[in-house]
Amino acid sequence: MKTHVLLTTAVAVLAWGCTKNENPVEPNPDPDPVVVTTATLPAGVETHSYGPASLTATGGDGSYAWTVVAGSGDLPGGLTLSSAGAISGSPTSVGGHAFTVRATSGGVSAERALSIDVIPLLTITTTSLPDGQQGALYPSQSLEATGGIGNYVWTLASGSGPLPDGLTLSADGDIGGTPTSAGAAPFTVEVTSGTQTAEQALSITIDVPTPTSRIVFTRDMALEGNQIFSMNPDGSDETQLTSYNVGGGNKIRPAQSADGTRIAYTATASGTHIWVMEADGSNPVNLT
């Protein structure tokens, strides 16, 4: 009987020892802290597709659920944040927009303050330009735009037609000069501001000068001989256009050009010669 009790006790002790040491369970380690690693976000352009910009983090169990912290601010209108951390859409509200995002992973979360700037859409507001007159100074025109980052560089767009002969476009958007030929000139301008560009089709028509309504005639000036004058049809504003001191002799047979901008006449000093001058008497030139 005594032997039987000892054997039973020994078997129980051995069984307890085996059970105690078989496959011990290790406790789960604490997850690494979550850290939001996205520090900045790219700017957007009003009404243009944004991103998507993907938020990133480390730590936790490696998978992250993203949200915007309530009361921290809002994404720009038109943008959304997915639970996977993608910010996308087409922003509709310009300016700076500050907010805080939260990443949650394995029951642990972290937050990061971020912001997105939305730049106004670049738009050319000049939609038409005045006509000009051949041979006359074109009234200087400044092209205008809104949006972008505020400084504008202007050029003719690739493939655009040229400006009228004699006119130029500066990088500041000023069109000026003296057109030398008549006709319609369609062209397209381009403006650049930061990363944005915009184009606008425009046109300038250069007209042939309207013939003058002034009357030209010759008057005997006694010692100066015959000289050429002009006056309005009602006889007012009589103006002497030639003198003996230029070209000498008599100035006769005045004839206006078809556009009224020049006058041809005959001068009789040292023979008979054809001269031409501007309608106001300036720039006389001996042609023969």
Image (cartoon, rainbow, N blue to C red):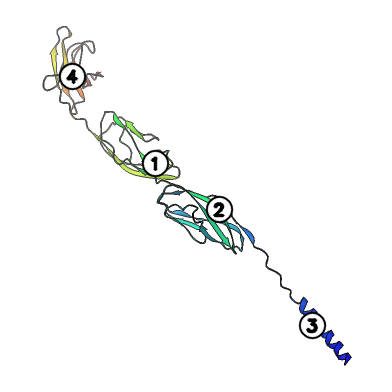
* Badge 3 density bin: few <14, some 14–19, many ≥20, Cα 10 Å: few
Mark 1 and mark 4 lie on one chain; the one further toward the N terminus is: 1
Mark 3 — residue?
15
In the drawing, does residue 49 fall left or right of residue 134? right
State the SS at label 1: strand
The image shows residue 156, relative to residue 22, as above or below, that is above
Q: Is residue 85 visible?
A: no
- For the residues labelled 4 and 3, the Cα–Cα distance comes to 138 Å
Of the numbered discs 2 and 1, the one sitting upstream in the chain is 2
Mark 2 to mark 1 CA distance (whole Å): 37 Å
Q: Quadrant of residue 104?
A: bottom right
Residue at 53%, 55% in the rendered image? 101
Residue at which label 4 appears: 265
Q: What kind of residue is marked 3?
A: Ala
Q: Earlier in the sequence, mark 4 or mark 2?
A: 2
Question: Real-space Cα distance between discs 3 and 1?
Answer: 89 Å
Q: Distance from label 1 to label 4 (Cα)?
A: 50 Å
Q: CA distance from mark 4 to mark 2?
A: 87 Å
Q: Disc 4 vs disc 2: which is toward the camera?
A: 2
Which residue position holds label 1? 191
Disc 2 residue type (three-letter): Arg
Kindly tell me whether residue 140 is visible in this rendering. Answer: yes
Q: Residue furthest right?
A: 2
Q: Earlier in the sequence, mark 2 or mark 3?
A: 3
Q: CA distance from mark 2 to mark 3?
A: 56 Å
Q: Position of residue 138 (x, y in %)?
A: 29, 31
Disc 1 packing (10 Å; few <14; some 14–19; many ≥20): many
Q: Disc 2 marks which residue?
A: 112
Question: Which residue is more in the foreground, 244 or 167?
Answer: 167
